Image: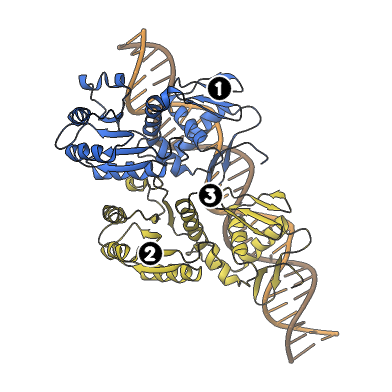
Chain colours: A blue, B yellow, C brown, D orange
DNA sequence: GCTTGTTCTCAGCCAGTCTTCAGGCGTATG
DNA sequence: CATACGCCTGAAGACTGGCTGAGAACAAGC
């Protein structure tokens, strides 16, 4: 994935080895410079040593919880932004107010699209003083990551959350062929256990909503995948 | 086969001796430097010792499964890309997330063409940052491995998946005479039990689609095989 | 609670694709 | 020159991948 924030340094803190592997593999592949820690105390040390631009932090850790980790990091003067990973139910008071400091959180199970979008958004806010585009464009398609508004040829189009995530993923990877497996891996939650056909369904929905007019932008490559691109290239 | 990634070092991990033999022989012939392992634990050791550029890894192994192998390899710091071999049906839990780190998978039974194409694609993506050509050319033939687009003399030509694989195989082996048996072995799935005649059929289809104009590039050597080459040689 | 929108599954359908078969043609060989 | 063999190709039928409508399952808001 051609992430705009290429080379930003992330510290990923997560004790479940499977999820840690999932995260670090995909964030690295997305162009981030990733280091990892599997406990709260290791995280505090790593943050001091490596000075990451952003921390991805599971709130449930074996030793300290995520909020403790942040407090310790802040006490040593670091003002690193954080994206928290929390369980679905966590209506915890603690989660509240997280977004106040420019931080954000994502609930498990998340999709990688979701997480990387949040990371990008937080980095956008905190680095380079707010002055970066939250708007993706491709041909006459426009997608605003902040407001979740989508326009085709200037016309506003209403998308459901999944449709939006799928379109964003296609736009971030415009002109790149994406297999159904890749789309499933990135756009759907990591615990989704269904078949490929759901991708076909959502591609179908998207086409109906954003690709009814010429020129067609969403193309099927039979046996290979889908690609967003201008025809006749 | 004149693979672009000649000399890349592969580690092939597969417990079925027949398939292992098939794979290592043909990948060696394709120009890769191949070492092998027949169990998960042997694979981990071999990866540490030999530092391959890519691992071809059966997910069904007698001792550890493929995912365990990867995790152990990653824990010892290796960031080697992987192409997994999986059973067709395996919509299995585990298969999800495989494409996240730039890795890929091929379902059994595959064709060798399929597998080497995936290996090349993964190496292309992971080594030397993405911008290497996915385009094969021979004379006025162009074939894009990523988008599956084919041009003859600048004209776009539509090919079916099998036609595409056959042409790619011919192009990768331009100027080399290929017997029908060879073509069958490389382009068709290894469990294909059919007649040579299907190769003739597909050569015929290909000629109709990409070889209608002068100079003719696909030549028959009666009793021997086929060859892609410029005439008057 | 109910309503509304959304997610996901399922099954039917269609176009395109794969595979087989058989007849015809050309070339090599006696 | 006759024959056999290899190759080419049209036709036909089976099969498959992808698209979509219908609806069940679920969640969110009222």
Q: Residue at x 77, y 71 (%)?
A: B232
Q: Where, by quadrant of the figure, is residue A19 drawn?
A: top left
Element marked by disc 2: strand
Q: Camera-side residue: A151 or B33? A: B33
Chain containing mark 3 = B
- Residue B40 placement (x, y as % from top left): 28, 62
Q: Quick check: marks 1 and 3 in contact, CB under 8 Å?
A: no
Element marked by disc 3: loop
Distance in Å between CA atoms under marks 1 and 3: 31 Å
Give the residue number, with chain letter if any, for mark 1. Answer: A151
Element marked by disc 1: strand
| Mark in the foreground, 2 or 3 | 3
Quadrant placement of the N terminus of chain B? bottom right
Question: Is A127 placed above or below B233 here?
Answer: above
Give the residue number, with chain letter if any, for mark 3. Answer: B131
Question: Is B151 placed above or below A158 here?
Answer: below
Q: Which mark is residue B138?
A: none
Give the residue number, with chain letter if any, for mark 2. Answer: B11
């Amino acid at each position: 994935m051609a992430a705009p924030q290429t080379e930003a340094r992330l510290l990923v803190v997560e004790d479940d080895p499977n999820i840690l592997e999932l995260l670090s593999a995909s964030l690295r592949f997305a162009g981030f410079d990733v280091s990892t820690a599997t406990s709260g105390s290791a995280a505090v040390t790593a943050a001091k040593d490596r000075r990451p631009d952003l921390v991805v932090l599971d709130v449930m850790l074996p030793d300290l919880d995520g909020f403790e980790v942040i407090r310790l990091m802040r006490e040593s003067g670091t003002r690193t932004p954080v994206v928290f990973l929390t369980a679905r139910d966590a209506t915890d008071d603690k989660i509240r107010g997280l977004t106040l400091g420019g931080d954000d959180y994502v609930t498990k199970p998340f999709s990688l699209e979701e997480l990387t979008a949040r990371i990008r958004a937080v980095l956008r806010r905190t680095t380079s003083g707010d002055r970066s585009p939250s708007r993706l464009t491709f041909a006459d398609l426009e997608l605003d990551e902040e407001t979740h508004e989508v326009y085709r040829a200037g016309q506003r189009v209403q998308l459901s959350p999944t449709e939006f995530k799928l379109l964003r993923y296609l736009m971030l990877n415009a002109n790149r062929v994406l297999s159904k497996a890749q789309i499933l891996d990135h756009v759907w939650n990591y615990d989704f256990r269904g078949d490929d056909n759901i991708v076909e369904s959502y591609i179908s929905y998207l086409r109906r909503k954003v690709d009814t007019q010429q020129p067609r932008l969403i193309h099927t490559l039979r046996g290979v995948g889908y690609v967003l691109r201008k025809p006749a290239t």
